[in-house]
Image: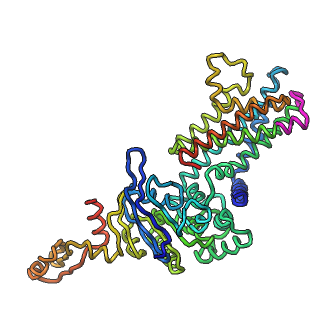
């Protein structure tokens, strides 16, 4: 299966040539501009939320939104059926088709980190950088599985495409991504814990400061991703 | 009997809507079988079970004697799904090449097979063109290439000619005929009666359940309850029962033609009464 999936990834890498400008702008230039622009107005003690929030935002867009939109379109055009008939599982197709975006998302995470360090918003060493990689991979997996579950449940491609955008952006700005979890009023806490980006953003931020609890948040995120994978399977995409 | 595809008592429903009712059918090796039915008859739902995109609620599906969900079986299958399109941002060569690679064919063999497929489908001129720049007929030919590049034993084509102009449709028919000559088992779904009549060894009429099955000529004779008589003097066409035919003809003055109904007439008659 690994051989087949790597061929599929190779195919999508070739396909991405046609979208390079958009991918480069949204995965690299846009998040860097956010960090750079807001660095002038954010206070030093909250700067880490600007950086980890923007990385989480990137993960949400490049995994959740991207998987749902591209998978939905490929199902609409019969390509998903073709791949399933060739023995490629839907989850494998989801990961392979969003690989370029996810890769750019992860690269983007480190570029944001580099710019933030250059602007003296945060300081980070190699160990924290490695912890961040774990959080980015798990966050990308969880976002991708959320996109897969959405695709399995929503058959109407136009609706799916819109909701993928709404959730991608919504989960980034209505969850405690750009601000601390403690700022959330108590009555909203249950809702916040329903949002997958809550777990992803906590894991990303805590890994950047080498706080061991990032492992726990990552485990929650991983569990969430597995639940989405099971749901997608139940709803017909396995 | 050496069956490439065998379906027994297959049932499928979507909520309260029963999509397939006790479907049983078979396709032998080297045989081209058509599923003929109106839109919403369950043709696509049925074929999705054959490559395991759907799983049976009840009944049994067997492809090449095994479970179609097994990857070993899937590698011997070639499928053109309904309304499918190749990848627009890849060339014809790349689309066909990667269709071989994702089925585990080695790089070297995939290149050889792809060149052979391009040659056999007369796509050489378009080898390096991006699919987005091709006509509908050429896109469909590329899709067939993606389905056959790994030399499958069984081909499943879900309405492969829908939306094509007559010339492109005929070209695709020629390709299917040559694939059949190579000994592959082919299952074709279509709502074009002429297509089924020209290409098929056997035809299944389907509308959520199997209504009838047989060779095209067998179906025409078995279900011809009347003759069509065309009176060239008046320019009128009549439907006349067999026992009344002699008497009817004797009353005609001038030239006339008698023929049994076309497969299309039989199909419409049967589907509307099903």
Instruction: List x then y, in percent, for residue B161.
Output: 47, 66
Instruction: List x then y, in percent, for residue A56.
Output: 73, 34
Answer whether residue B170 is visible to the viewer in this image: no
Marks counted in the figure total: 0
Within the magenta stretch, is there residue A132? Answer: no
Within the magenta stretch, is there residue A124? Answer: yes
Give the left or right position of residue B108, taking residue B44 as reference: right
- Rendered residue at 18%/74% (across/down): B235
Scheme by which the image is coloured: rainbow
Give the left or right position of residue B232, taking residue A87 as reference: left
Instruction: List x then y, in percent, for residue A237.
Output: 57, 48
Give the quarter of the image for residue B34: bottom left
Q: Is residue A143 above or below residue B114?
A: above
Give the left or right position of residue B49, taking residue B239 as reference: right
User: Relative to the observer, which residue lies in front, B149 or B17?
Assistant: B17
Q: Is residue A13 above or below residue B135?
A: above
Which corner quadrant holds the C terminus of chain B? bottom left
Question: Residues in magenta?
Answer: A118-131
- Rendered residue at 42%/53% (across/down): B12
Q: Is residue A190 above or below residue A152?
A: above
User: Relative to the observer, which residue lies in front, B216 or B14?
Assistant: B14
Q: Is residue A88 above or below residue B260?
A: above
User: Relative to the observer, which residue lies in front, A10 or B161?
Assistant: A10
User: Relative to the observer, which residue lies in front, A167 or A27?
Assistant: A167
- Rendered residue at 50%/64% (across/down): B62
Answer whether residue A218 is visible to the viewer in this image: yes
Instruction: List x then y, in percent, for residue B217.
Output: 32, 77
Give the quarter of the image for residue B210: bottom left
Q: Residue furthest top?
A: A186
Give the quarter of the image for residue A47: top right
């Amino acid at each position: 299966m690994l051989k087949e999936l790597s061929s599929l990834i190779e195919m999508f890498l070739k396909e991405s040539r046609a979208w390079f400008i958009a991918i480069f702008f949204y995965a690299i230039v846009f998040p860097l501009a956010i960090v750079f622009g807001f660095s002038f107005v954010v206070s030093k003690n909250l700067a880490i939320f600007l950086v980890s929030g923007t990385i989480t935002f990137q993960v949400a867009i490049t995994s959740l939104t991207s998987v749902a939109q591209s998978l939905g379109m490929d199902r609409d055009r019969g390509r998903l059926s073709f791949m399933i008939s060739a023995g490629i599982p839907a989850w494998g197709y989801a990961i392979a088709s969003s690989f370029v975006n996810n890769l750019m998302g992860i690269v983007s995470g480190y570029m944001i980190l580099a710019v933030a360090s250059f602007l003296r918003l945060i300081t980070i060493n190699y160990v924290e950088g490695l912890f961040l990689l774990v959080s980015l991979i798990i966050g990308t997996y969880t976002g991708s599985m959320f996109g897969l579950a959405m695709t399995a449940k929503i058959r109407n491609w136009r609706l799916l495409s819109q909701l993928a955008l709404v959730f991608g952006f919504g989960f980034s700005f209505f969850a405690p991504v750009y601000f601390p979890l403690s700022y959330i009023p108590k009555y909203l806490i249950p809702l916040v814990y329903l949002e997958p980006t809550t777990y992803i953003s906590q894991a990303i931020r805590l890994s950047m400061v080498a706080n061991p609890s990032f492992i726990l948040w990552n485990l929650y995120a991983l569990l969430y991703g597995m639940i989405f994978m099971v749901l997608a399977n139940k709803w017909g995409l396995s | 009997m050496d069956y490439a595809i065998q379906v027994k008592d297959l049932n499928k429903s979507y909520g309260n809507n029963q999509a397939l009712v006790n479907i049983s059918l078979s396709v032998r090796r080297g045989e081209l079988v058509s599923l003929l039915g109106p839109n919403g008859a369950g043709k696509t739902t049925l074929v999705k079970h054959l490559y395991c995109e759907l799983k049976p609620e009840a009944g049994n599906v067997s492809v090449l004697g095994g479970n179609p969900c097994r990857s070993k079986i899937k590698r011997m299958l070639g499928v053109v799904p309904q309304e499918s399109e190749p990848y627009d941002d890849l060339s014809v060569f790349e689309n066909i090449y990667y269709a071989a690679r994702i089925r585990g064919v080695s790089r070297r063999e995939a290149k050889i097979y792809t060149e052979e497929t391009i040659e056999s489908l007369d796509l050489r001129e378009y080898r390096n063109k991006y699919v987005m720049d091709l006509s509908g007929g050429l896109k469909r030919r590329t899709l067939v290439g993606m389905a056959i590049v790994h030399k499958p034993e069984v081909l499943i084509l879900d309405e492969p000619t829908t939306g094509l102009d007559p010339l492109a449709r005929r070209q695709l028919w020629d390709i299917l005929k040559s694939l059949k000559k190579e000994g592959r088992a082919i299952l074709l779904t279509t709502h074009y009666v002429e297509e089924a009549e020209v290409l098929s060894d056997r035809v299944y009429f389907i509308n959520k359940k199997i209504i009838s099955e047989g060779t095209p000529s067998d179906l025409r004779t078995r279900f011809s309850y009347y003759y069509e008589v065309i009176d060239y003097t008046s320019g009128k066409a009549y439907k006349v029962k067999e026992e009344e035919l002699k008497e009817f003809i004797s009353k005609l003055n001038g030239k006339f033609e008698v023929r049994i109904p076309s497969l299309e007439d039989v199909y419409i008659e049967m589907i509307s009464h099903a």
